Image (cartoon, grey):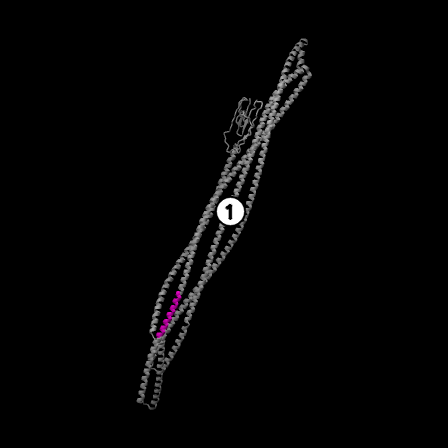
Amino acid sequence: RKAMRTRSSSPPIHVHINDSTPVHVHVKSHRTSPLRPTANVKTRVPWIPPGKASTRDASYKWEGPMHRLEITPPLPEPEPEHSHSALLLADLTSEEEEGLHGRINQYERKIDSLLTEVSSLKNEVELRKREQLLERQSERLSVSQRVIAEQEEELAEVTKELEETERENTRLRQSMEKMMEETDYSLDRDSVQPDKDALLRKLMEAEVDGTAAAKEMSALRESVSKLCSASVSEQRLSGSESSVLALQKELLLQKLETFEATNRTLRNLLREQHGSQMESMRLSEQKDTLLKRLADTEAENAHLVVKLQEKDKEVNQLSRLLDTEKDNAKSTADLSKTLESTRAHLQGQLRSKAAENNRLTVQIKNLERAANQQKAEIEHLMEQLTSLRQEASADREALKRATRAQKQRAERSEVTAGQLSIQLLDMSRIAELTEQLQSTGDKGRLEREALLDHLHGLTTESTAARLENQSLKATAAAVEEKLDMSQSELQQVRASIKQYESLLDSYKIQKTRVEADEYAAHLAQAEREAQVVQGKLEQEIEEVRREMLGRLAELEPLPEALRQSELQLQEAQDRERSQERRSVELSTTLADLRIKVETQGSQMELFRQKNKVLLEENRQLQQRVESLERKLEEAVSQNSDLLAVITKREDTIHSNQLRLEEKTRECSQLSRKLEEALDDARHQMSETRERAATKERSTQAKILDLETQLSRTTSEINQLKRNKEEVERRYQSRLQDVKDRLEQSDSTNRSLQNYVQFLKASYTNVFGDVALSSSLRAPSPI
């Protein structure tokens, strides 16, 4: 009968069974572990020949919370086949491990919550940055819209100015047409009036009449002087003399009348000629001014058309810039969305990888704990083996001591007793020894069987532990490979993040370059506009100078005409004085001369008024020149401001270029570092792969060695079994021989006992009972 006891904390179970009946005992705990067994180790079972399948089933199985044990009882067959006992470790956790798992899960949750918070904060920061970028872009768009609105207002003003200039052009054309009609009419009228030849003839006639009148006046004076002298001498006038005087007087009056008529006609002709000349001058001046105005208006129209075209180009450019900025904003929004999605995906991957790493670390820790537990159990089993070996050695020594004591007692009995007692004692000792040998043999056989079973269990446990260690090593290698893979993936993710950051930096650099190019283009346009404005101002100043010079050139003959008119006035005054001195009778002529003087005074007043008008025009032109000079100064100041702005922008562009160069250098350095890191990572990956390959090769070699060792141990165990069976057979044969000898010794002992009893009876009859009993009790070991 056999008794089995469990190792768990539950109360022990005693099972009393026969050797022939197979019993399967399954004891499992109610708790289920969250961990799964990492590797199922198949126990190697020796080959069973056909017809002996029941020997495998005749085994005892026991499962506890930590172990499972299979025991095959020894069979009383001559050639028993012992199956290897299997010791498997199920990945079942205790309360402490469950607490640790709970803490680990809490830490994982905390880590996930912290990662979510960090990702949310990063997303908020990125959203704020994007909002700031969008605000900047919206500000730029608003500024561009304002610029477009201002340019539209300027275009509206320019269109209004164009319309006004067109109206003025139409008015000027109408006035020009009217002036041309008037000039045609005046030309027709001048063609009707007498020409300059007729005027010169009239002048010659007036001179002839004047000379004739002067001659008549001289003749009349001579005659009057003669008469005066004659009257002084004679004091009387004759009729002939009086008649001559009357004739001379009549002739003189006729001559004077003709002279006055010619003078009147001359005056009329001169007035008409002067009026026609003045009108022609006025018309020519008006024509020149109108032509200049037309040229100015045409130039202004051309300038305004150019400005309109430039403004249209600027509006188109600004609209294109708006479209490009909108496209850029859309592309930036799309890029931001893609970056957000990629970052979210990468963060999710990082979280999943971190969770997997945490789980793998927890599994590795659990596996290490299980390995440590297995090592502790193996050490405990080894200690039990050593204790059992020590106990077996102690039992053997006790048996040896007992045999020695028995031998000493047998020697004493041999010395004290005689040959018969020696024989009896030898027979009894042999019987006892046979019994003891049988009992010790049974005990030794049982102990050996138990020790062999225990050794088989330990070997199976050691093989299972080795296989589990190998599986744990394999899982650890796999975990290390996964960690390497995760690290490589993390490096790839970091590299991708760095690539995205480099792309963002390149995009920002391109954007800054585009903005710098746009600012440079705007500056070039501003410089061109400033140059155009300067050219226009210089052209306007030159035109004003030309106009002033032309007007001065036109005004230069006026003082000569004034001088001539003054000279004529002086001559006329001299003539009037001479005529007044000559005669009082010429009062009519003097009145006429006064009228002439009045007319000439009115003409002088007209000339003075014209001079005042010209002076006012000169003042207006000077004011225009001053305003143009002010505009020039303002344009020069604006040009200086623009030059300052251009220099500032050039400085900013230079600084931006320096920054771009620095950033390109940093990018090149970062790319070199990335390449170096990638090379290092590749070298590390190759080294890790080589190490893993070497580890795999070493593990495979170790597995092969262990398999060869297992095959050797199995062969040695089979040989030991065979030797044991042979030893048992020999022992049984010897036992049979000893039994036969014992039977023979029993028969001899019986005959000897009968003989001894006969001797006792004879001795009692001869010597008495007391001496015999005392002599017989002393040497008897029984």
* Percent of width and height locating residue 511: 48, 51
Most common SS among magenta residues: helix
SS class of the residue under badge 1?
helix
**From the viewer's perspective, is residue 495 above or below residue 439?**
below
Q: Is residue 337 left or right of residue 450?
A: left
Residue tagged 1: 499
Q: Name the outermost residue toward the bottom.
A: 234
Quadrant occupied by the N terminus: top right
Choose between 100 and 380: the one closer to the eye. 380
Is residue 358 visible in the rendered structure shown here?
yes
Q: Is residue 277 magenta?
A: yes
* Percent of width and height locating residue 524: 47, 58
Q: Is residue 603 left or right of residue 665?
A: left
Q: Quadrant of residue 282?
A: bottom left
Q: Which residues are magenta?
A: 271-294
x 64%, y 14%: residue: 748
Answer few, some or many: residues within 10 Å of disc 1's Cα (few below 14, many 20 plus, some between 14 and 19).
some
Choose between 633 and 441: the one closer to the eye. 441
Q: Amino acid at mark 1?
A: Gln
Instruction: Count the marks.
Output: 1
